[in-house]
């Protein structure tokens, strides 16, 4: 798929489009390619705790649109992409990373690995389980207290509670979402990320397991002339940019 716009052009072109042209269809294969670009986004510990549900059937689009309160962006969209955070898949994804690392380094006895290779293996065998293993939030809270006490004396990692690890998964999913939307903008397709939805209903529609969480629903299509509600507003750059 040829990207017709530069990165800056695509970022500038991207707007949250709330009404889509009903006469213009979008190519499912091209949207899928943009989702392939999404999974190239950076992700914490390379765990890739995400899934992407590409909604192309009218039946499911209508169901999810209803769960998004039939807001114009959802109702007029030609396709939808639901981005799901899957923190509960950390064991499978850590194992996949570990297998990849061992294959890359060569299958050999542990004493034959150098220090860098041993660290990478230990990271996924020991550190990741220590961060993600929890029981009713109690273990995470204990880690949080202990590490914050240590933090009085030296820098430590402090995002250790169950809620913190959820945020980590959602941040990675949001980075993937931005990759997707910029890829769509680069070829002249439009999107609108929607947080206004009944996420429990969407999980039921998609038959998602309990541990999954809806990150966002993204409407897709080609903008109608009335699809952008007004000129872009941003607070002055000087208010948000701090050089130190």
Image (tube, rainbow, N blue to C red):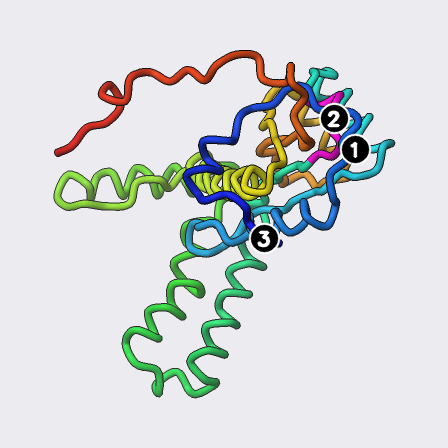
The residue where tag 1 is placed is: 205
When asked about the image quadrant of residue 56, the answer is top right
67 up-or-down from 168: above or below: above
Q: Residues within 10 Å of mark 3 (few under 14, many from 20)?
A: few
Task: Find out whether residue 75 is within the magenta segment.
Answer: yes
Above or below, 209 against 198 in this view is below
Q: Residue at x 46, y 78 (%)?
A: 104
Mark 1 touching mark 2, by CB under 8 A? Answer: yes
Identify the disc placed on residue 201.
Answer: 2
Let me know if residue 222 appears in the view: yes
User: Foreground: 13 or 140?
Assistant: 13
In terms of sequence position, does the residue under pointer 1 or pointer 3 come before the other? Answer: 3
Kindly state the secondary structure of the residue where label 2 is placed. helix
Residue 210: image quadrant is top right
Quarter the C terminus occupies? top left
Query: What residue lies at 44% left-to-right and 87% top-to-bottom?
Result: 108
Compared with 218, 85 (above or below) is below
Dot 1 surroundings within 10 Å: few (below 14), some, or many (20 or more)? few
What is the residue that sits farthest to the right in this orientation?
59
Picture residue at 45% right of the left edge, 31% below the top: 12
Tally of numbered tags: 3
The local secondary structure at tag 3 comes to loop
Where in the figure is residue 138, as x and y percent of width and height? 45, 38
Pick the residue in front: 157 or 83.
83
- Is 54 in front, or is 131? 54
**What residue occupies the far top of the structure in this picture?**
230
Rendered image quadrant of residue 202: top right
User: Which one is closest to the eye, mark 3 or mark 2?
Assistant: 3
Image: magenta residue range: 73-80
Q: Earlier in the sequence, mark 3 or mark 2?
A: 3
Residue for point 62% across, 54% down: 1
């Amino acid at each position: 798929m040829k990207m017709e716009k530069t990165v800056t052009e695509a970022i500038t072109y991207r707007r949250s489009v709330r009404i889509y042209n009903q006469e213009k269809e979008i190519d499912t294969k091209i949207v899928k390619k943009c989702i392939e670009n999404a999974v190239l986004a950076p992700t914490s510990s390379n765990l890739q705790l995400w899934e992407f549900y590409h909604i192309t059937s009218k039946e499911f689009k209508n169901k999810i649109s209803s769960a998004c309160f039939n807001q114009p962006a959802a109702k007029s969209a030609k396709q939808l992409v639901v981005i799901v955070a899957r923190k509960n898949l950390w064991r499978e994804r850590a194992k996949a990373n570990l297998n990849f690392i061992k294959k890359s380094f060569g299958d050999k006895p542990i004493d034959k690995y150098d220090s860098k290779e041993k660290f990478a293996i230990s990271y996924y065998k020991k550190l990741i389980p220590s961060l993600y293993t929890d029981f009713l939030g109690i273990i995470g809270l204990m880690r949080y207290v202990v590490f914050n006490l240590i933090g009085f004396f030296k820098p430590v990692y402090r995002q250790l509670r169950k809620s913190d690890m959820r945020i980590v998964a959602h941040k990675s999913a949001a980075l993937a979402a931005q990759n997707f939307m910029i890829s769509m903008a680069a070829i002249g397709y439009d999107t609108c990320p929607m947080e206004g939805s009944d996420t429990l209903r969407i999980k039921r529609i998609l038959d998602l397991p309990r541990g999954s969480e809806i990150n966002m629903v993204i409407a897709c299509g080609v903008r109608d002339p009335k699809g952008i509600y007004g000129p872009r507003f941003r607070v002055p750059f000087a208010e948000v940019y701090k050089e130190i």
